Image (cartoon, grey):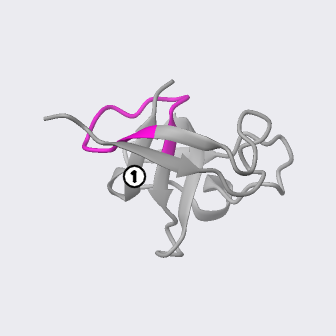
């Protein structure tokens, strides 16, 4: 089965300097493939079901992935520091480049 490619538009500055507001990132639809440290994942926000987030995997745990934005300003990203581990079930797409 071929996986679908999803083009995801970056909104905001949380992934700067690697991706800036308005950039488009090609991701593979998530269907259980391995998630590794360094991957970028697209997922449903744990507390806001209508919000989709794009973050980098910093750590893998038994419960899921600890994710962070790339922006070095700690106030520039809402990520696992705010909402905790992201369940792998919440992942929509993954970029492994």
Let me know if residue 37 is in the magenta part: yes
Q: Position of residue 45 (x, y in %)?
A: 52, 65
Can you say which quadrant of the picture contains the N terminus? top left
Along the viewing direction, whichever of 54 and 82 lies nearer the viewer: 54
Which quadrant would residue 53 be assigned to in this image? bottom right
Q: Is residue 59 above or below residue 74?
A: above
- Residue at far top of view: 97
Point 65% across, 45% down: residue: 68
Q: Is residue 93 above or below residue 3?
A: below
What span is colored magenta in the figure?
Answer: 27-41
The local crowd at label 1, few if under 14, some if 14 to 19, many if 20 or more residues have their Cα within 10 Å, is many
Instruction: Say which element carries label 1.
Output: strand
Report whether 49 appears left or right of 25.
left
Residue at image mark 1: 91
**Type of secondary structure dominating the magenta stretch:** loop
Q: Is residue 43 above or below residue 36?
A: below
Which quadrant would residue 78 be assigned to in this image? bottom right
Let me know if residue 54 is in the magenta part: no
Point 32% across, 31% down: residue: 34
Report whether 67 appears left or right of 87.
right
Point 55% across, 28% down: residue: 38
Q: Position of residue 19 (x, y in %)?
A: 71, 39
Q: Position of residue 21 (x, y in %)?
A: 74, 50
């Amino acid at each position: 089965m071929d996986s679908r490619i999803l083009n995801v538009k970056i909104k905001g500055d949380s992934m700067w300097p690697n991706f800036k507001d308005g950039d488009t990132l090609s991701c593979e639809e998530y269907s259980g493939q391995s998630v590794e440290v360094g991957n970028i994942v697209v997922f449903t926000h744990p507390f806001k079901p209508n919000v989709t987030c794009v973050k980098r995997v910093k750590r893998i745990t038994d419960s899921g992935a600890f994710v962070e934005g790339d922006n070095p300003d700690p106030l520039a990203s809402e990520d696992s520091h705010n909402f905790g581990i992201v369940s792998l079930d919440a992942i929509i797409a993954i970029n492994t480049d």
